[in-house]
Image (cartoon, grey):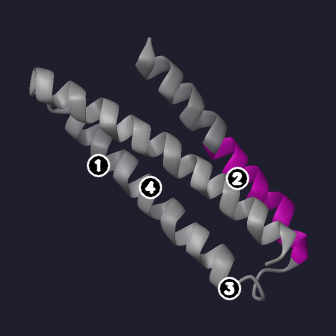
Amino acid sequence: MEFTSAVLSGVSIANMIVLGILMCIFGKMYSKTKARLPLGLIVVAAMLFLHNVIGSYAYFSMQHIFSPEIFPYMLGVGIAELAGLLLFLKITMD
């Protein structure tokens, strides 16, 4: 495996971990309140989780298709998503 694919996959896996934590928190919120908002947040988090699963798989299985020039942009998008999710997790925990 190339270094770039490993880094991109690592960022996607970190995103999946944060999304899994968020889904658990929203699930607990829903079970306590029966409100509809946590259900919507679970759906959004699940779709982002699926996006990261597909992306991580693509980095592993199709690394020969990605050109090295696109790596910084894809890494930037992944890191921006991770930063946003961590901020969202912090706000949710407060």
Q: CA distance from mark 4 to mark 3?
A: 19 Å
Mark 1 Cα-neighbour bin, 10 Å: few <14, some 14–19, many ≥20: few
Secondary structure found at label 3: loop
Reading the image, the residue beneath label 3 is: 62
Marks 2 and 4: which is nearer the front? Answer: 4
* Circles 3, 1 touching at the beta carbon (< 8 Å): no
Specify the label residue 77 is tagged with. Answer: 2
Measured as percent of width and height from the top left, residue 5 is found at 76, 70
Mark found first going from the N terminus, 3 or 1:
1
Reading the image, the residue beneath label 1 is: 43
- Left or right: residue 85 versus residue 46 is right
Q: Is residue 76 magenta?
A: yes
Mark found first going from the N terminus, 1 or 4:
1
The quadrant of the rendering that contains the C terminus is top left
Q: Residue furthest front?
A: 1
Measured as percent of width and height from the top left, residue 24 is found at 32, 37
Secondary structure found at label 4: helix
Q: CA distance from mark 3 to mark 1?
A: 28 Å
- Main SS class of the magenta portion in the image: helix
Measured as percent of width and height from the top left, residue 84 is found at 60, 35
Where are the magenta residues, as a range? 68-81
Mark found first going from the N terminus, 3 or 2:
3
Q: CA distance from mark 1 to mark 4?
A: 10 Å
Under mark 2, the amino acid is Val
Residue 18 versus residue 55 in the image, above or below: above
Reading the image, the residue beneath label 4 is: 49
